Image (cartoon, grey):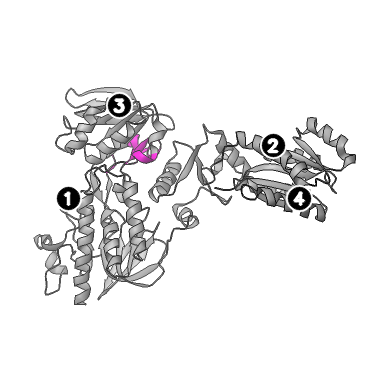
């Protein structure tokens, strides 16, 4: 945490040197000491201190300075740091002006020159002022701040990106938090510039792209080398496991993700059936541990970076990125995972990011404190999201087409939901319409048994339905099943096109696609178990097949 500041100003170099020495001698452990000979220079520096979220505890200014009196300086400084204590350094002839300043600028004290010995004439006075300041001082947030509208898709995208990449930040809603408007004013911005991200160093980005924000935060969007042993596309549990095993076994490995590590599992509020964690762990915690582990083994992680194509030429594969950059690798693991299917409903689509969210319970939950929310979906992700939302929402309603959850959800989650008084399961219920002005306010629900409709108040709608594999971008000869999942191993023989594209003496390895040296692991693979543990297992297993493939070539 930054130390608060004591700011001293005196145009006499000898006096300034003396006060600087005495201040540092007594206060340097608990305060930063800033000194200058120019009142104007000090005044010019104050807006930058405000932008950098610094705190000034005390201004100590000489009264007689060329161009600006000490009283004048303290009056101007008070507008930027109203809570800072203000003291004048005065000669005997300036006493009358100092007394007037007590009323004019709420001067806290005046100290006569010389102040020797400081143990008697300086420190007791300043100790008292600083003690008074500390009694009401509450350290401000000096980290990353995001300012925007709560029901803004752009703000939601940035929140999701920051949370997914494990960057702690403070959310300031422009419509309800006065600090938001204050931050805009300090940086000469308006509401038309929202969303705005403010950094600890005082810089701001208005309406940043994910790429610009990632670069500013120190994420690595470009590969450091041109040739790798293994490139992993997608940093969900399968990709993270592959990265850990690839790096630990000596492969020059690079992991690439277009948004953030963790995948769908990374947004999970609680994973309670993962081996070795009897009390469960959050998706963010699992992701943090895995990224740290992979990094320790020398794995490069590129994000946000989107892979747009992979081409194969002999034993080398060229991976092309959205920004035009490329890298060459000897083997590829596709672990892009799946995304939640969107409800094909125009009235809901217009509220996406403004009350309607796809798998974003942990990111947006606290915006719906004491409000009713609805969850669509009957799988484990929906159950975990509902449990998390129940901590803050007044009521959580789970809407499913079936009569209950027993066919689609793990029993431990069903038991938890049954024991949670503010969660209600609405069986045979479909959400057919969303209503609202600039954000979702109401939902129209249809009872599938009686074919009747009713309108309900809704703070938010969280959708966890179906799994759509993220494979649309793949243009190379990769065989997929009718739903778009990647076929691998022995299952490839069932497809008529397999013999047309596989021209090798051996059969594909268990997790190998019909493009030699390109493997698939996790939820993106046809026949996957759709569990975190199985995805991690496939990621590790894929690396063993990568070793076999590399040994062949």
Element marked by disc 2: helix
Please name the residue that numbered disc 3 is placed on. 444
Q: How far apart are marks 2 and 1 (CA)?
A: 67 Å
Q: Which of 534 and 128 is in front in this view?
A: 128
Please name the residue that numbered disc 4 is placed on. 19
* Within-10-Å neighbours for mark 3: few <14, some 14–19, many 20+: some
Residue 506 horizontal side relative to residue 359, left or right? left
Between label 2 and label 3, give the one nearer the viewer: 2
Q: Nearer the viewer, residue 12 or 545?
A: 12
Q: Nearer the viewer, residue 152 or 145?
A: 145
- Residue 359 highlighted magenta (yes or no): yes
* Within-10-Å neighbours for mark 1: few <14, some 14–19, many 20+: few
Between label 4 and label 1, give the one nearer the viewer: 4
Residue 81 horizontal side relative to residue 292, left or right? right
Question: Which residues make up the magenta segment?
Answer: 341-363
Q: Could you tell which of marks 2 and 4 lies nearer the N-terminus?
A: 4
* Within-10-Å neighbours for mark 4: few <14, some 14–19, many 20+: many
Q: Residue 113's x, y, as percent?
A: 83, 45
Q: How far apart are marks 2 and 3 (CA)?
A: 63 Å
Q: Residue 214's x, y, as percent?
A: 45, 55
Q: Residue 225's x, y, as percent?
A: 39, 71
Q: How far apart are marks 2 and 4 (CA)?
A: 17 Å
Task: Residue at 76%, 38% (x, y): give it.
Answer: 75
Instruction: Specify the label residue 128 is tagged with.
Output: 2
The answer to whether residue 484 of the structure is visible from this angle is no
Q: Could you tell which of marks 2 and 1 lies nearer the N-terminus?
A: 2
Task: Residue at 22%, 52% (x, y): give it.
Answer: 523
Task: Residue at 65%, 37% (x, y): give it.
Answer: 131
Q: Compared to 361, does 535 lie above or below? A: below
Please name the residue that numbered disc 1 is placed on. 529
Q: Compared to 273, does 136 lie above or below? A: above
């Amino acid at each position: 945490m930054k130390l608060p500041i004591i700011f001293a100003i005196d145009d006499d170099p000898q006096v300034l040197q003396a006060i600087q020495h005495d201040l540092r001698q007594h206060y340097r452990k608990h305060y930063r000491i800033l000194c200058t000979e120019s009142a104007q220079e000090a005044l010019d520096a104050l807006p930058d201190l405000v932008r950098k979220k610094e705190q000034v505890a005390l201004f100590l200014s000489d009264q007689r300075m060329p161009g600006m009196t000490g009283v004048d300086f303290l009056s101007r400084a008070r507008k930027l740091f109203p809570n800072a204590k203000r003291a004048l350094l005065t000669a005997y002839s300036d006493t009358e002006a100092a007394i007037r300043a007590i009323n004019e600028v709420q001067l806290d004290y005046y100290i006569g020159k010389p102040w020797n010995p400081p143990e008697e004439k300086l420190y007791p006075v300043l100790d008292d002022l600083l003690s008074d300041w500390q009694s009401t001082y509450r350290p401000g947030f000096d980290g990353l701040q995001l300012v925007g509208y709560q029901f803004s898709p752009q703000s939601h995208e940035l929140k999701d990106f920051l949370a997914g990449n494990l960057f702690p930040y403070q959310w300031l809603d422009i419509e309800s938090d006065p600090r938001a408007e204050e931050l805009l004013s300090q940086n000469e911005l308006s509401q038309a510039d929202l969303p705005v991200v403010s950094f600890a160093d005082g810089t701001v980005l208005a309406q940043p792209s994910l790429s610009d924000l990632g670069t500013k935060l120190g994420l690595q969007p470009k590969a450091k080398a041109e040739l790798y042993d293994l490139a992993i596309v997608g940093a969900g549990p399968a990709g993270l496991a592959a990265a850990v095993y690839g790096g630990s076994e000596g492969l020059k490995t690079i992991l690439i993700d277009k948004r953030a590590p963790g995948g769908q599992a990374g947004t999970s509020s609680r994973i309670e059936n993962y081996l070795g964690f009897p009390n469960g762990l959050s998706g963010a915690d699992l992701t943090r541990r895995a990224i740290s582990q992979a990094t320790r083994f020398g794995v490069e992680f590129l994000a946000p970076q989107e892979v747009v194509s992979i081409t194969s030429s002999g034993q080398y594969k060229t991976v092309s990125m959205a920004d035009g950059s490329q890298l060459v690798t000897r083997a590829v693991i596709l672990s892009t995972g799946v995304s939640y299917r969107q409800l094909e409903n125009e009235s809901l689509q217009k509220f996406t990011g403004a009350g309607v969210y796809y798998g974003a319970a942990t990111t947006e939950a606290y915006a719906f404190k004491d409000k009713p929310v609805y969850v669509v979906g009957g799988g484990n992700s929906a159950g975990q999201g509902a449990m998390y939302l129940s901590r803050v929402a007044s009521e959580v309603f789970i809407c499913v087409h079936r009569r209950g959850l027993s066919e689609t959800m793990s029993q431990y989650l069903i038991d938890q939901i049954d024991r949670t008084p503010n969660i209600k399961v609405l069986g045979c219920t479909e959400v057919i319409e969303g209503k609202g002005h600039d954000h979702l306010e109401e939902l129209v629900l249809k009872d599938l048994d009686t074919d009747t409709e009713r309108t309900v108040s809704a703070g938010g709608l969280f959708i966890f339905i179906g799994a759509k594999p993220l494979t649309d971008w793949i243009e190379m000869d990769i065989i997929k099943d009718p739903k778009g999942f990647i076929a691998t191993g022995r299952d490839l023989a069932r497809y008529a096109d397999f013999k047309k594209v596989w021209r090798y003496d051996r059969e594909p390895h268990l997790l190998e696609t019909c493009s030699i040296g390109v493997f698939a692991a996790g939820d993106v693979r046809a026949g996957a178990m759709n569990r975190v543990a199985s995805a991690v297992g496939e990621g590790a297993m894929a690396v063993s097949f990568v070793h076999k493939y590399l040994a062949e070539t």
